[in-house]
Image (tube, helix red, strand yellow):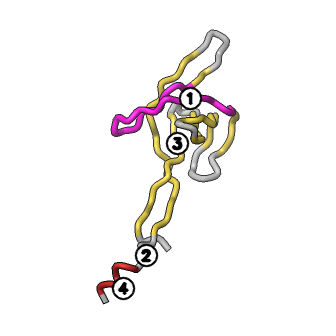
């Protein structure tokens, strides 16, 4: 019976969460705003390698709207939003144990 319990697969589920982050950005004389680095609450920093697209839109994954910067970080896309309340957020992926 113990072997069966060990073989049983743990159910996990990935969910998205709205997470506010600290952002370092450059402001240009022509009015452009370009984020360059994201800092998480635990202090981890991620340099933005490239900005692929900028457009005003709603997040379709978590509650929120604003200017969406589709950024490349370590070769992977990240959707970074700048809200009208001057806050930045990302759609953070969280793995939940025991999901269906």
Decide: marks 2, 4 in contact (CB < 8 A)? no
Query: Quick one: label 4 or label 1, which is nearer the N terminus?
Result: 4
Residue at figure coordinates x 50%, y 34% from the top left:
87
Where disc 4 sits, the SS reads helix
Instruction: Specify the label residue 90 is tagged with.
Output: 3
Quarter of the image for the N terminus: give it: bottom left
Give the Cα distance between marks 1 and 3.
16 Å
Q: Quadrant of residue 71?
A: top right
Q: Is residue 20 above or below residue 11?
A: above
The residue at 51%/59% (across/down) is: 15
Is 99 displayed left or right of 42 in the figure? right
Sequence order check: which comes first, mark 3 or mark 4? 4
Residue pointed to by mark 4: 4
> CA separation, marks 4 and 1?
46 Å
Q: What element carries label 2?
A: loop
| Disc marking residue 9 | 2
The residue pinned by badge 1 equals 49
Q: Residues within 10 Å of mark 3 (few under 14, many from 20)?
A: many
Q: Up-down: is 100 above or below 93?
A: below
Give the alpha-carbon distance from disc 3 to disc 2, as whole Å: 30 Å
Asked if the residue at tag 3 contacts the one at tag 1, i.e. Cβ–Cβ closer than 8 Å, the answer is no
**Most distant residue in the front direction:** 3
Q: Seen in the image, is 100 located left or right of residue 34?
A: left
Looking at the image, is mark 3 or mark 2 earlier in the sequence? 2
Secondary structure of the residue carrying numbered label 3:
strand
């Amino acid at each position: 019976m113990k072997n069966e319990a060990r073989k049983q697969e743990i159910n996990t589920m990935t969910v998205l969460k709205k997470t506010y982050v600290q952002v370092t950005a450059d402001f240009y004389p022509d009015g452009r705003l370009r984020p360059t680095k994201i800092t998480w609450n635990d202090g981890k920093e991620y340099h933005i390698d490239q900005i692929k697209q900028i457009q005003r839109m709603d997040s379709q994954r978590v509650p929120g709207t604003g200017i969406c910067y589709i950024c490349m970080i370590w070769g992977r896309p990240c959707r970074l939003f700048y809200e009208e309340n001057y806050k930045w957020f990302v759609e953070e992926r969280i793995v939940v144990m025991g999901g269906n």
